[in-house]
Image (tube, helix red, strand yellow):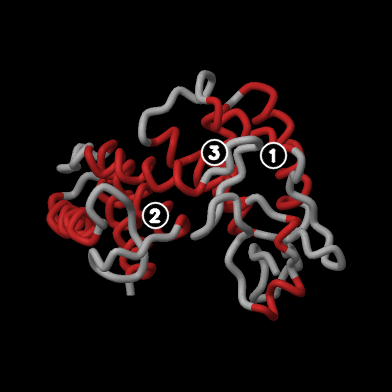
Amino acid sequence: WQYNHVCAALAMTEAYGLTGPRLFKAAAQRGVDFVHASQNPYLAWRYGVRDGDNDTSVTGWAVMVLKSAKMAELDVDEGAFRGSTAWVDKMTEPEFGRVGYQRRGGPPARTTAMMEKYPADQSESLTGVGVLVRIFAGEDPQKSEFVQKGADLMNKKPPRWDIDAGTIDFYYWYYATLAMFQVGGKHWKEWNESMKTAIVDNQRTESGRDERGSWD
């Protein structure tokens, strides 16, 4: 259950990094150690432990763990970042910078039912993951060709709350927002304005309702 692990490990590294109690440190470090232990040699991650399979989504969460751990001054192997960018390089279509799931420049991974409701052509979710991985692995967002190309693609598909068009994609918005903030400049300014409109304006705010504060 690698997906569960990396999300839980991210929560623990953030908890330790933000609050600093010794009680959290050992658990956070063990989470990081397992992320290292499960990475495929010279590449990335998927559902198993060094089973030779990789995908961009699990890799994004694993890199989030490593970046958080590094900021919290836990023990992190810098070589893990190099593997993650090697995978993202393999998945990046060179002309426009689109990042695929397990195929270069391919679409986001969805079930058939979700693909019909939320068309892949409305999302650049894995491009957002790939851009963030590159930045967290040390690429200069202003000088990296594929960071800039990815940011251009994402700005062409800004957050838009349209149920009928299938544009509501919280996974995409999560990663793209993190990535665009790191890119900064006009990319972030344009993205941020669209994001605030899409997200803030559609939060459940009815008083006395259990749903208050949430999103559909």
Image height check: is 37 above or below 5? above
* Sequence-wise first label, 3 or 1: 1
* Sequence-wise first label, 2 or 1: 2
Q: Between residues 21 and 101, which one lies in front from this camera angle? A: 101
- Look at mark 2 in the image and give the residue it sits on: 59
How many other residues sit within 10 Å of disc 3, few (<14), some (14-19) or many (≥20)? many
* Residue at the (79%, 65%) spot, across then down: 166
The residue under label 1 is which amino acid type? Leu
Relative to 113, is 47 on the left or the right?
Answer: left
User: Which disc is residue 179 wearing?
Assistant: 3
Q: Between residues 29 and 51, which one lies in front from this camera angle? A: 51
- x and y percentages locating residue 76 in the rendered image: 19, 42
- How many numbered circles are shown? 3
Image height check: is 200 above or below 74? below
The residue under label 2 is which amino acid type? Thr
Image height check: is 4 above or below 96? below
**Mark 3 residue element:** helix
Relative to 145, is 76 on the left or the right?
Answer: left
Residues at circles 2 and 1 in contact by the CB criterion of under 8 Å: no
- x and y percentages locating residue 13 in the rendered image: 28, 51
* Residue at the (77%, 59%) spot, across then down: 167
* Residue at the (17%, 55%) spot, across then down: 33
Image height check: is 132 above or below 118? above
* Sequence-wise first label, 3 or 2: 2
- Label 2 and label 1: CA atoms lie apart by 21 Å
- Look at mark 1 in the image and give the residue it sits on: 153
